[in-house]
Amino acid sequence: MEPLSRLLSPQAIVVIGGGAWCAAVVAQCRQTGFTGPVWPVHPTRTEVAGVPAYPSLADLPGVPDAAFVGVNRVATIEVVNALADMGCGGAVCFAAGYAEASAELADAATLQAQLVAAAGPMRILGPNCYGFVNMLDGAALWPDRHGLSPVDSGVAVIGQSSNVLINLTMQQRGLPLACVVAVGNQAQSSMADLGRALLDDTRITALGLHIEGITDLAAFEALAEHARALGKPIVALKVGSSKQAQAAVVSHTASLVGSDAGARALLTRFGIAQVETPAELVETLKLCHLTGGLPSGTVASASCSGGEASLMADLGERAGLEFPPLTPAQAKALRAVLGPKVALANPLDYNTYIWGDEAALTACFTALGLGDQALTCVVLDLPRPDRFTAPDYDMVIHALAAARATNGRPMAAVSLLSEGLPEEVCETLIANGVVPLCGIREAVQAIAAAAVFGGETAEVGPLARKVLLPGPDSAVRLHGEAEAKALLSGAGLAVPRACRATSAQEAGQRAIEIGFPVVLKGEGVAHKTEAGAVALDLMSADAVEAAALAMRCDGYLIEEMVTDTVAELLVGITRDPAHGFVLTLGLGGILTELINDTVSLLIPSTRDEVRLALARLRTGALLSGYRGRKAADIEAVLDAVMILQGFAETHCTRLQELEINPLMCRPSGAVAADALIRMGDIT
């Protein structure tokens, strides 16, 4: 394959087609300062956008490195084949009507396959794709507006929506955006392939991803490993958590979406920062551009207002940030500059005693930066420039820059409102190594997101364990509770003593063999509790027989009653085609859906990762002994989870779903009280 760098950083460009889109590409290349030749190709026109045109590819004076193909979907295949034959480096395929339109066009998937075959070793971007803008080299194979300016270094953003990318280029928050790439259908060159190529450019400092669906899990894993090896952060805005979004994605990109839980678990495993909004994406990328990511979510904050300090504390805590107490060195230096009237705390309200004194402001911010926090923040909103001049506010900016130069540690200016730091101020701060974070909520979310690149998550361990890839789709069937428990018991999972019966009278007799109290369950019922097919704590054969008669089922499962339970857990494993096998842990029992307290990991996960995940549950305190109650045998719980994970790894080619609900967690031991498995038969 041709290197993607040849397409993304071309020396010569050809534009094929005569529509307004192609004229826009020719014009964009000139406006962005591309210094190499741009060759329009059109069979009848003598010029396109003021640039002399050539009647055919055969008439070009040289071999292009990159091509924009702006003809219809059938003609695109012919053009791509001709470009490949002449040795072109790569082509942006603008036309739509390929695999993304399979539901509407019978030949859509076939045409996409023909397009890939026609390209051979030549790289193609798309189809159904706007292309890219590379402001490091002034190349803009992009048929629309964009808001980028030339930069010497900066971040790159790859996305599956051209319009989202256009809007991101229009940001006025000071982000040095060096390159945007729209991937379209990813017929040949995937988001992961492009990400690796961009990160290899020493001028690219961080990578942003707008992800609708992941098409190649192994390639995405390789991207994460590559980024970690280079020490460059990746920040992802993943859509598709709602049913409506998932429906839109399927019709738009022909890629697998998978579950939201699976996507989040996957990104966490890969050490990729996750954000919820485009604004958070921009702010996190700014932070990563200047810091390379943060070692933790610890923050020291200063403002000249108690109200601002409180907002920083409240919103920061909700985002998961920590504000460590001031160290003796910080307190001593701050007291020296602020005097006795200011209460020293973190977040710090330094009052207005030193306002307008640039030297004192510098000393204050320098002193605050003496701690071991990951980031030192100063809250600052500039007045409206159309109504006021603000030389005293400029002093804060100068003081921040001076403190950053003195301490050599990450510092940020945080505005309450996004417009509180105008673009030119952001650019000044970045030039001085200070991160401008626009909007306090976006700021604290960005800090929390950037902290994923430090601490334990920065180790190579998680990436060293390959994600368990799901096999191809295959026929599966539901293994009922008794059958599922037998399979899991064979793998080492503790289950209640049980037997089966086909009649109410037999159920009563079998209960005597097990010993009372017992649980009676009607077989062949999906949601037994709601259907009245579960009877608990039965103390006699007559009680069992009466309960069975009331259920009116074809078969019954009689089990010993598990007592002394301190907590009930849900443990589920699901085959997610887009993200691997997802392990879900949460509050179990009949309140699972109502409480919705779950956390998800990818298989394989380590015992310690499962331990930490259980601790993150809102109801996790039940396991450790809530309000004087007995604690669960956490090692037995972990044993059970690891057994289930091992079962999934053993049967990964046929397993679709496995669920224990509940896992009865006791002071000694953990027992699976209910189970279901959907998978193919074991041969």
Image (cartoon, rainbow, N blue to C red):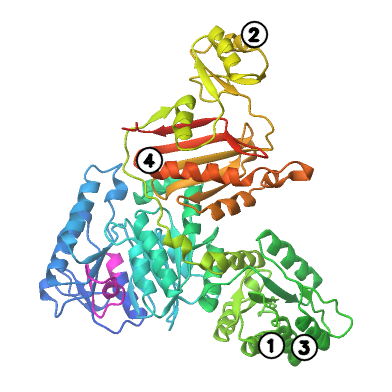
Q: Earlier in the sequence, mark 3 or mark 1?
A: 3
Q: Residues within 10 Å of mark 2 (few under 14, many from 20)?
A: some
Of residues 622 and 220, which is closer to you in this image? 622
* Residue underneath mark 4: 651
Give percent across and percent down for residue 588: 61, 37
* Residue 250 - label: none
How far is disc 4 from disc 1 in space, using C-alphas? 61 Å
What is the C-alpha distance between the residues marked 3 and 1? 11 Å
Secondary structure at numbered mark 1: helix
Q: Quadrant of the N terminus?
A: bottom left
First in sequence, mark 2 or 3: give its number: 3
- Image quadrant assignment for residue 395: bottom right
Residue 368, given in percent of the width and then of the height, sits at 72, 81
Q: Kindly identify the residue that appears in the image at 53 percent across and 44 percent down.
A: 641
Residue at 43% from the left image edge and 64% from the top image edge: 165
> Mark 4 and 1 residues: CB-CB less than 8 Å, in contact?
no
| Residue at screen point 62% across, 31% down | 590
First along the sequence among labels 4 and 3: 3
Residue under label 3, please give it.
356
Judge left or right: residue 552 versus residue 536. left
